[in-house]
Image (tube, rainbow, N blue to C red):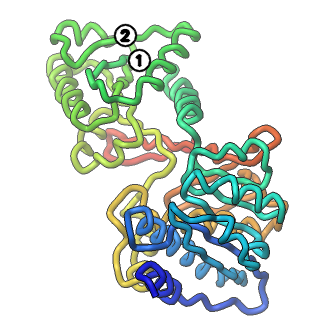
Amino acid sequence: MNRRKRFFIALMLAFLLIPAVGGKTIRLGVMLPLHDDNGDGRRMVEYYRGVLMACDSLKKSGLTVDVHAWNTPEDCNVKEVLQDPAAAQCDMIIGPLYSRQVRALSDFVAQHDIKLLIPFSITAPPLYTNSNIYQVYQNNNDVNSHTISSFMTQFKDYHPVVIDCNDSTSKKGSFTFGLRRKLEERGIAYNLTNLKSGEDAFYKAFSADLPNVVILNTGRHQELGVAVAKLNGLKAVHPELNISLFGYTEWLGYTRLYLDAFYRYDTYVPAPFYTNLSASATQRLQQKYRWNFHQDMQQMLPRFALTGFDHAMFFLSGLNAHGKAFNGEAAQSSYKYVQTPLRFERIGNGGFRNRTLLLVHYQPNQRVEIINK
């Protein structure tokens, strides 16, 4: 028996699901790389454990979840996995991780009328034709469009200041160019400046009459640090200026370095998730994870076990309440997420894509507000 096989069997035995008595049964399939060979496998193992914890929690409402899991590494032939008769009996399948495996799974769930939750991949062409598919993550164009729309609503009375950070590796140009086009279409004045600008030129980019919102054209922490220092110098000379920061999801990983600055500059960070490690629900799940699996969740954002927990709770409780009529729309679910909100909308005549965007707002009173867009 090879190492990957031994690890997968150990994983399956690590968590015992005790069926609920007298309730409904939902058959759930999980097709992800569930192994200990690389980072993908270890992250998906943690995600899968979160799914199992959700199944365990739902027993209290009388729901039994019959879980079948298949290890589908990157070199896996998914068509061979799908020959297992148990796959066709699933009410829902979670997977795959790799985009190259999407087509085979899409054809299979369409043939057998099974719901397919694609938890991470942003490349899924069958989404536009297969009504059985649910995609959690939006592609970059959709993320930018949604974020720009949220920005225009949140900061309609602000003066935008776009700072060129001289980062030749930045991939944020599509966002800042799109934002500038939208501002110009609406006839909203904005200014451009540069991290290398002198003090006087930098100051002239800001409005003394309107609150200012600053946007960097990079998500890297090095340039963020320089920008914060630049703003600190500006505020020391011109304390009357009202300044907010609008950032990127990557900034959530920088909070240990820049939390004080985020509060000081009334910072908004758009993100598809928010991990509040001090929240009681988060702490309970972290403790449950330790009890069941004898280790802590990996120290990364998002926490993959919490992601799996939210995904499974949302869909399994929805299927329990609405059966096949459940489509993930907001009106059909009352589940309060721990980390990852979900709200699906149909894409044309095809499947459904999650349209939730959070604005994580670091307020000057040192509180964090979550705005669900």
Q: Residue at x 76, y 79 (%)?
A: 85
Percent x, y of residue 214: 35, 23
Tell me whether circle 2 and circle 1 mark residues in contact (CB < 8 Å): yes
Quadrant of the image containing the C terminus: top right
Position of 268 relative to 240 (above/below): below
Q: Residue at x 35, y 67 (%)?
A: 298
Q: Amino acid at mark 2?
A: Asn
Density class for disc 2 (Cα within 10 Å; few <14, some 14-19, many ≥20) is some
Q: Residue at x 61, y 62 (%)?
A: 95
Q: Quadrant of residue 104?
A: bottom right
Q: Is residue 281 visible?
A: no
Percent x, y of residue 244: 35, 28
Would you name the residue on which mark 1 appears?
Answer: 160
Q: Is residue 205 visible?
A: yes
Q: Residue at x 76, y 62 (%)?
A: 108
Q: Amino acid at mark 1?
A: Pro
Q: Quadrant of residue 233?
A: top left
Would you name the residue on which mark 2 appears?
Answer: 191
